[in-house]
């Protein structure tokens, strides 16, 4: 009989196992992984550097990065937050660094450092981790969990599911009476074909972006890519709008304000001033808004302003169109692309069916959930991992204390 059986050999599974085994040395702890390798998502995360968490140390601020899970995670974050994550890794010999944008990585800049730490700690506390164990069925008889795998049946007193967005496990949970919120992609980039941004690959600038006919709006760096637009500003929109944009079948319009909070009317007034200040200078070669040079040239072209026109010769219609292109440019989005190798989904176990003081199922005693199996997701920056660490830690604190 296994004391704690954990299904899922990823970040949440290992963090749960290590913390449980460390606190309860006499408990038998087993991790099952369906694949040939453990911690595969950890390996590719953060471009192979593993963005373990974020330098946001106040739970009230931290929850604002979670489009789904904000309310539920406030209490757990008071138990185990980003500073606790840093302390946990550093106590185990992993040096961390905070980058300018708040993301936290191992000093080594290698996800292998995190993987090595987990494997070392799991061995140290005698966690039994097994590969190639695909779960086929889960049932409960007389308070004992029976888990049928591709390599036989295992019995356990406590079951922890840390399988991420695994549809097969979600289906098994439905047979146990749990409600699954259907998965849709989150954290994706926008596919846009438009002459205004064609061949401007790699240009990045702060911008305000709205999804037309919705309340979705975001501020932040916008990156032009060969397939359209990406960057933190776009990724935030994709996370908060995950379900709305899925309902639109990823066919919608965005309004981009390259000047952030400057309105079209305010922009017209600024342009009138520049017509006087820069009168004899050529518009295309004199960009008063500090926008990337090639982007400015495209915006000027889109405003029907000839490449040799001087500021003094810009007419009223051109001034209005330039203001419009700068502050309310409409782009058609047709489709999405996955952000880097990371694929985050919105969806999972309905949060109403989970006790967030323990991360235990409200439907079944001794059944726990950690990580992305829940309908919790965050924007990019280490926040999805922080959800995994926090849930796993809370489980380890409460699993034998109920």
Image (cartoon, helix red, strand yellow):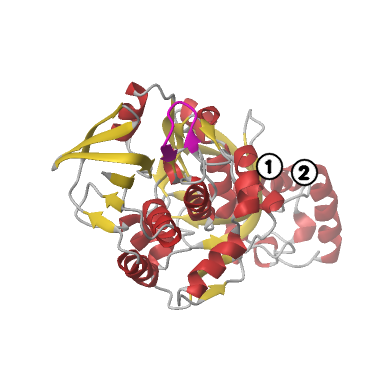
* Residue visible at 39% across and 47% down in the picture: 343
* Residue visible at 25% across and 33% down in the picture: 146
Q: Nearer the viewer, residue 92 or 39?
A: 92
- State left or right for residue 353 relative to residue 41: right
Can you give x and y, in whole percent of width and height, for residue 205 in the image? 61, 60
Quarter of the image with the N terminus is top left
Q: Quickly name the residue at label 1.
A: 328
Can you give x and y, in whole percent of width and height, for residue 372 in the image? 44, 43
Q: Nearer the viewer, residue 281 or 66?
A: 66
- Secondary structure state at the residue bearing disc 2: helix
Rendered view: 90 above or below 266: below
In space, the residues marked 1 and 2 are separated at their CA atoms by: 7 Å
Can you give x and y, in whole percent of width and height, for residue 305 in the image? 65, 52
Q: Is residue 25 in view?
A: yes
Region in magenta: 360-368
* Residue visible at 79% across and 45% down in the picture: 263
Q: Is residue 304 in view?
A: no
- Secondary structure state at the residue bearing disc 1: loop
Rendered view: 134 above or below 272: above
Can you give x and y, in whole percent of width and height, for residue 297 in the image? 60, 59
Q: Earlier in the sequence, mark 1 or mark 2?
A: 2
Marks 1 and 2 in Cβ contact (< 8 Å): yes
Q: Nearer the viewer, residue 123 or 352?
A: 123
**Is residue 38 on the magenta stretch?**
no
**Is residue 363 on the magenta stretch?**
yes
Q: Quickly name the residue at label 2.
A: 264
């Amino acid at each position: 009989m296994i004391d704690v059986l954990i299904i899922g050999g990823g970040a949440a599974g290992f963090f749960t196992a290590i913390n449980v085994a460390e606190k309860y040395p006499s408990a038998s702890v087993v991790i099952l992984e369906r694949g040939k390798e453990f911690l595969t998502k950890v390996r590719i995360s953060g471009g192979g550097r593993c963005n373990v968490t974020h330098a946001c140390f106040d739970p009230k601020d931290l929850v604002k990065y979670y489009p789904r899970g904000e309310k539920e995670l406030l209490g757990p974050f008071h138990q185990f937050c980003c500073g606790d994550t840093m302390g946990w890794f550093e106590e185990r010999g992993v040096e961390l660094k905070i980058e300018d944008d708040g993301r936290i990585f191992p000093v080594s800049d290698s996800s292998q450092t995190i993987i090595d730490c987990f494997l070392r700690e799991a061995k140290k506390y005698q966690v039994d981790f097994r590969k190639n164990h695909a779960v086929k069925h889960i049932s409960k008889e007389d308070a004992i969990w029976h888990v049928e795998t591709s390599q036989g049946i295992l019995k356990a007193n406590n079951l922890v599911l840390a399988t991420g967005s695994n549809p097969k496990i979600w289906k098994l949970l439905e047979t146990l009476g749990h409600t699954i919120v259907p998965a849709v992609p989150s954290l994706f980039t926008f596919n846009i074909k438009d002459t205004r941004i064609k061949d401007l690959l790699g240009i990045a600038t702060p911008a305000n972006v709205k999804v037309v006919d919705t309340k979705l709006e975001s501020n932040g760096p916008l990156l032009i890519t060969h397939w359209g637009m990406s960057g933190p500003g776009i990724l935030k929109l994709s996370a908060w709008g995950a379900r709305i944009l899925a309902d639109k079948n990823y066919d919608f319009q965005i309004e981009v304000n390259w000047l952030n909070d400057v309105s079209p009317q305010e922009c017209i007034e600024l342009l009138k001033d520049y017509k006087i200040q820069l009168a004899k200078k050529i518009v295309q070669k004199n960009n008063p808004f500090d926008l990337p040079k090639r982007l400015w040239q495209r915006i000027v072209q889109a405003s029907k302003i000839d490449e040799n026109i001087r500021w003094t010769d810009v007419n009223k219609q051109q001034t209005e169109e330039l203001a419009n292109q700068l502050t309310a440019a409409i782009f058609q989005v047709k489709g999405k692309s996955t952000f880097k190798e990371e694929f985050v989904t919105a969806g999972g176990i309905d949060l109403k069916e989970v006790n967030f003081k323990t991360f235990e199922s409200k439907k079944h005693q001794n059944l726990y959930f950690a990580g992305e199996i829940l309908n919790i997701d965050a924007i990019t920056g280490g926040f999805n991992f922080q959800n995994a660490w926090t849930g796993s830690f809370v489980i380890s604190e409460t699993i034998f204390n109920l």
